[in-house]
Amino acid sequence: MIQIQTEETVTISVDGKSINVPKGLNVIEAMNSVGKEKEVPHYCYHPKLSIAGNCRMCLVEIGTPMRNRETGEAILDEEGAPKIGWIPKPVIGCSTIISEGMHVRTKSPTVLESRNGVTEFLLINHPLDCPICDQAGECRLQEFSAEHGRGYSRFIEDKNVKPKRTRLGPRVTLDDERCILCSRCIRFGQEIVKDDVLGFVDRGSYSTLTCFPGKELSNNYSLNTVDICPVGALTSTDFRFKMRVWFLKRTHSVCTESSVGSNTEIWSREGKIYRITPRRNDAVNDTWMTDSGRGLYKSIESEDRLKAYTMDGLTTDIDSAIQSARALIDLGGVGVLGSAFSSVEEQFLLKNIVDHTKAQFEMVQHLGDGDGLLVSEDRTPNLRGALVNELLNTLPTKCPNLLIKGIEDGVIKTLLVFNEDLSEIGVPLELLKKSVNIIYFGSLRNNTSDQAKIVFPTLSVFEKEGTFVNQNFILQKFNKAVPGPAGLVSDIEVLNRLLLGANDQPGFTHIADLWTKIAESNELLKGISWEKITSEGLMLKQEKFGALNFPETKNLKYKPVAELQAT
Amino acid sequence: MAKTKVMERKPLTFSEKTFIPQIASGLATTFGNMFKKTVTLQYPEERPVIPENYRGIPTLVKDPKGRVKCVSCQLCEFVCPPKAIRINPSEIDGEEDPERAHIEKEPATFDINMLRCIYCGLCQEVCPEEAIFLQDDFSLSGYTREEMVYGKDKLLELGGTLPDRHFKWDKKKLAEESNSGHH
């Protein structure tokens, strides 16, 4: 794994041109920092895995200025320039760390010939079934074959036959004929998940990727092997033969599985999501994400999806729903059960509603087991958003005791519930039936929505835009990938109209306008605008929350405060 | 404003006033054509000879062994300029159809909207499996728009069988069975 420790740079010469690159990079990464045109093709090298150096695709020519061995002086050529001692044979770029004064040739005849030769060897046993291969369109072998292949095969012998449809695990299918033996998946299992199930058996051209006897690739990170496979050997059983990747639109988003907030890319076509893959962010999730997080989009097509504004179980339009909700709220005695699944913007508007109505506010915590990697103990994406918005001062409990007491005492007459199912968090349903009007905001039908007087169906994270604050207080933006159910307006618009009154026009037309308001009123978010939130996210100041005992334990990018202080 | 020039019309001569020479010459043309070779066709009873490589409507073809050649790679859908093609890919169920399990992929649905098709032939050119051909059918009709969206069955029926030079999937199957290697 290549990690830069210092901010030092070294000067190297690439194809005769001097450039500055950070110290400690290998040739592949150094060339990536120069630009696309200098890209060194590679298969087995992956920035987050150890270096194996077995594909031989990244061969480059390397040279250093020659020095006189006795005096240590630079040897000059006839023109007075330092003479370069080129290594007589090409070397692999992935395990060559650059050094001061190094010369690299990436386009010389030797280099091109090496790449052409490697490509020809990789293709002799490759089945060339691109028309049915799911990797087509994002296949490194396909790309580099176009660049370095010869277009026809000189190989007149028979190609190897290997197993074509091996089930490696519940979510991964292997086509061994396509495998180029780069061993990325094996290293991923050993180094990142520490679940060593894959290995090569047999020798030479019979080498085959397989699971060890009695084991299967069933860990919660197995689909990452599909992402890092440079060819179509490892395929996702779920996405297999569903859609060609070139039709899919990519949208940057954030995973809502836990407070880690893995950066994701949503692949959709014509309003239908086909798959979710991780997006590289070295501060959050490197290049990985969980299998469970990839399946979350399926809930938006669920039968329980709420698709219409209802009042007392009857479909109504948004205007009358908002009017009735306003009337209930204006009567006073309001309780609000907020949600850590709401975005920062929604929580900001909710905070305003709570302040206006002097409502009693509470939230609940959703805890689960963490896996030490990319699933944290806090199974909500935006608990810290509520802290930043000052909705909360302390961490919430599992059960909304204050609200229950308020209802029992008859203080709370109207209860706004966001995303939570009251029966699951320990609020007895009988209590609700008696004395309280529920206004429910959520995207899926549950016991609470059945009990509710007014239901505002909300959009899922894939259908709206907004931001979450993750475990490290990184403000991360998610974008709208697909349209929501017909007739539903965005959640921030509903909340804003609730806040302003039913007949008023919304105070903003775009989320950016809302962000100017947020930045004005929140100390921590000062100076931030919607456009300024990059796809890498923005780190917020977290000193204020140092005393809180967050439930997260150590995971890939998180260290609890106690451990941070110890080190 | 442009000036208009009024043309002077010549008065008709006597023979022109009678119209007889004009009628006679017109009838001469009419009767003359009666004895010449016809240039028109009695369409639709008579059909024109379609030259080779004519680009009629796109159709799906089968190989001589009756196998549907399309593997739903969706390249035609991608390349189609008016976006007339719509494919829904699916996996071949190996247990249900062990004969074709090795091909793995087939179109579940394959629709071409013939109202959109511009007969450019790019789908035929791009097809890596030689499964789609613009053949000699050029006259389409229907009562509704939906009728003009031809489905997989109709396209296969129109396409019929074309000779195959490769039988690549058969070779692959043979190699898989004998475990000896293939080409």
Image (spheres, coloured by chain):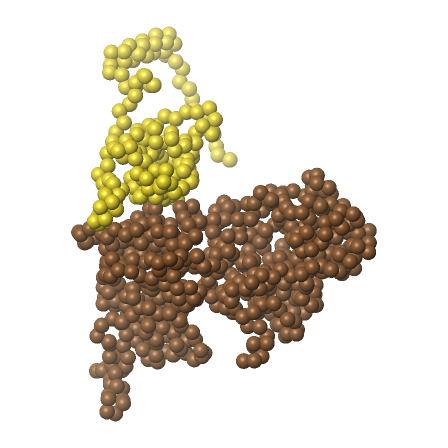
Q: Is residue A24 left or right of residue A557?
A: left
Q: Determine which quarter of the picture holds residue B24.
A: top left
- Residue in the image at 44% along x and 78% along y: A5
Visible residue check, residue A237: yes
**Foreground pick, A121 / B103:** B103
Which chain, by letter, is yellow?
A: B
Q: In the rendered view, would you say B64 is above or below A184?
A: above
Quarter of the view holding residue A74: bottom left
The vertical placement of A53 against A236, above or below, is below
x, y (%) of residue A161? 25, 51
The quadrant where residue A379 appears: bottom right
| Percent coordinates x, y for residue A60 in the rendering | 28, 69
Q: Residue furthest left?
A: A156
Query: Where's the N terminus of chain A, which quadrant?
Result: bottom left
Where does residue B45 sit, x and y in percent of width and height? 32, 17
Q: Residue at x 27, y 13 (%)?
A: B33
Of A482 and A1, nearer the camera is: A1
Q: Residue at x 50, y 52 (%)?
A: A295
Outermost front residue = A214
Q: Quadrant location of the C terminus of chain A?
A: bottom right
Is A431 positioned to the left or the right of A424 in the image?
Answer: right
Residue B100: x percent and y percent?
31, 39
**Which residue sits at x=28%, y=74%?**
A62
Q: How many marks are shown on the rendered structure?
A: 0
**Chain that is coloured brown in the picture:** A
